[in-house]
Amino acid sequence: MDTNGSLNGNVPAGPLAEKWDNHRFNMKLVNPANRRRYKIIVVGSGLAGGGAAATLGELGYNVDCFCYQDSPRRAHSIAAQGGINAAKNYQNDGDSTYRLFYDTIKGGDFRSRESNVYRLAQVSANIIDQCVAMGVPFAREYGGQLANRSFGGAQVSRTFYARGQTGQQLLLGVYAALSRQVAAGTVKMHSRTEMLEIVLVDGQAKGVITRNLVTGEIEKHAADVVIMATGGYGPVFYLSTNAMGNNVTASIRAYMKGAYFANPCYTQIHPTCIPVSGDHQSKLTLMSESLRNDGRIWVPTKEGDPRGPAEIPEDERDYYLERMYPSFGNLAPRDIASRAAKRACDEGRGVGDTGLGVYLDFTDAIKRLSLPVVQQRYGNLFDMYEKITGENAYEVPMRIYPAIHYTMGGLWVDYNLMSNIPGLFVLGESNFSDHGANRLGASALMQGLADGYFVAPYTVGNYLASQTPGDYSADSSEFTQAADDVKDRIKRVLSIDGKRTVTSFHRELGLICWDYCGMARTDQSLTKALDLIPALKEEFWENVSVPGGGDELNPELEKALRVADFLEFAELMCYDALVRKESCGGHFREEYQTQEGEALRDDEHFSHVSAWEAPRNGGRPVLHKENLEFEEVEFSVRSYK
Amino acid sequence: MDLTLRVWRQKDGQSTGTLETYQISGIIPDMSFLEMLDVTNERLIEEGKDPIAFDHDCREGICGACSLVINGRAHGGFSGTTTCQLHMRKFNDGDTITVEPWRATAFPVLKDLVVDRTSFDRIIQAGGFISANTGGAPDGNAVPIPKPDADAAMDAAACIGCGACAASCPNGSAMLFVAAKVSHLAHLPQGMPERGQRVLSMVAKMDEEGFGNCTNHAECEAMCPKDISISHIAKMNREFIRATVRGE
């Protein structure tokens, strides 16, 4: 493990509040008439990828956009429920760019890059304006003004929303802009197409190898620059709130080609999901965090209390978040609320058949606000809960439990969102930069659109200005080699003809990650995971059964290639968690906690980004550190009491 | 639960398909319909058979990827429910369940239960947007939007583009899908400048893609998992006539 060599984030000089403005002025521009001569590949069509593809198309570049779904409108940004933050201060409650910046830095447990976060807070207001202009039907007050709600980790109301479908409405805005560019001929959309390899020519990203998921054809695509916005790696845990197709393949392929993977151990567990009901379960459903605005979370004070919720009197209920964190109460940040739920269940006070659940109770809210108001605010969420559990949450409290939701780690990028591979840009959840060790609610949509609409269009242009357009060829030996590698990988996985299904491997991997690298981690558990994962990987390559062929629509083959990459990635995640001997945000090491059970950071030794380079000849990955320097904020213990 | 499944199997777009029968046991009422298919597929793979291909992704009723005509009804026909949100507790032990792909001329089958819905993308490309380039947008509160208008726009915008409307319509019409987008944007001041051109282009594209016309059966509304009202079709027709009369 190399601990030398400090990585340079290429953060512009100058006062924090002026960095982005100065940098925008200093960046090189591409003449409008020259833009069409540059070709840009965008992998992913969610808020970050779709937003970047549309915006770069509007600027006049030639864009090829890829997604594995049958339409870009189905990218998983669509599933975000609660809202999007912006420092508009429409509520006159003391919000500002600086406060959103500070809340995000603090929420991330002082493990994010200060300059990136400040820029995020700066452009947040533009995002809302842009979305309104594009017809996103945000919630409005009777006077016609935009409505806001509050969210975890903040004491101001800065969250904009469209019922419980904010992600859907924002993504449909992106999809509309993207569709307009497809019609204009600036963007060529490749749906049902999955990126399986990145191609470097003389160390620069120059294209990708893809598989057409309908015909199985392996295609070579070359361009002047490659943008990846391929989402997070939550499904390494198998059960998560992510979509079934979400995967780490693009990121891990880039990692294998030399891109650094940063902070993979920062995974976010969302406190309000519907509990697991059985072994058949394929995914976990999130109930929006906005429910915590009015719902009260509690468990019985007594261990193993067999009574139903209605029979438990008020003085035998423990509203533990309100008790432990009086100033934030039920709106404590996600990592803190999740660990508190785990603690309650570990103490034997969990509810439901499995004992892995806590109540989220709306009885008081209905009394205070009336049933129609609660229905209006949360009706669709209550309906969703009833569909899944068969229970009416207006009458019986919801049961919730934490689940893997978001991953803060991702490919390392500099201030320009470019990875250490020149010409490879990484946006949205697939990069690491803005959320540190924990993301605040309603900040994922903000980051996706910030990167896609307002950051990448400038910084990618700056990179292209230094490139000769068209300096690539999909017929070069690098492309042929990469395509052959992909074909070999497919041939190999199809030829194993073993006894176990792909899903059974995925499920086992997920369980290892959840049990040993989940909500609480120890030296011992991680060491165990690092024994189990390579063994599982070995078994996968000897005993997996993938029916069908490579030249047809074959969902099992798609899954097999993704699970193979999750197996590579899981080891990296656990290793990062083992080496980071502190607790921060979503990374909780049991050895490092305060007497009250709160995360104990070690700023002296771990105030850095851990950026991992793939091992060159077997062995462990190589660590590169980017020291986190805070000019504006001072380290403080993250208290929500 | 023990079930008999009759599932449409079709190798690819060129082949003809057939309904195959499978016996499946040990299904738990808490499983979603797609989890029941997962279990069936795991068993088929273990038996060395080809698993059933079907579209799915988010499994929480919002991405619009899942489809399936279940016992003759799109998404099973339960109010406000996509196939991924449908749970087996809605069925009985011993039931025979027939599972088919979307049926519409403009949705050709790719394999088994998977169809090609890119015709919907092309309709949106024809005009389902507001032409506002990134940058330079006025403040979000600069133009107040009355709450009833914002709510009506949101009602229409809730469409997930799954295609159940076209698959349920005896004419294979996509009117509800197109109307939802036209109505969403026609309720907002930002949508006004392109109001006429939008509806004309989208309707022309819808016809060109091979979707049929509306004859007021209202099957689309009944099967829509997001409860989109056919009143949006009336709104679209008004928009269409207005644009035509004005010669836009």
Image (cartoon, rainbow, N blue to C red):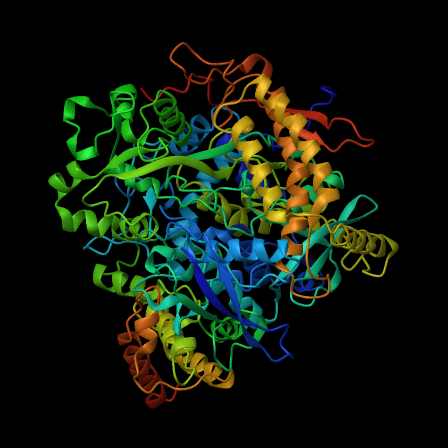
Query: Does A44 sit above or below residue A192?
Result: above
Residue nearest the observer in this picture, A628 or A12: A628
Q: Quadrant of the C terminus of chain B?
A: bottom left
Query: Does A407 sit above or below residue A76?
Result: above
Q: Quadrant of the N terminus of chain B?
A: bottom left
Query: Does A147 sit above or below residue B8?
Result: above
- Which picture quadrant has residue A472? bottom right
Residue A30: image location, x then y, percent = 67, 55
Residue nearest the observer in this picture, A546 or A58: A546
- Which picture quadrant has residue A442? top left
Residue A313: image location, x then y, percent = 14, 26
Residue A244: image location, x then y, percent = 53, 51
Any part of residue A15 in sight: no
Q: How many marks?
A: 0
Residue A167: image location, x then y, percent = 41, 52
Any part of residue A410 in sight: yes
Q: Residue at x 59, y 44 (%)?
A: A504
Q: Residue at x 44, y 53 (%)?
A: B27
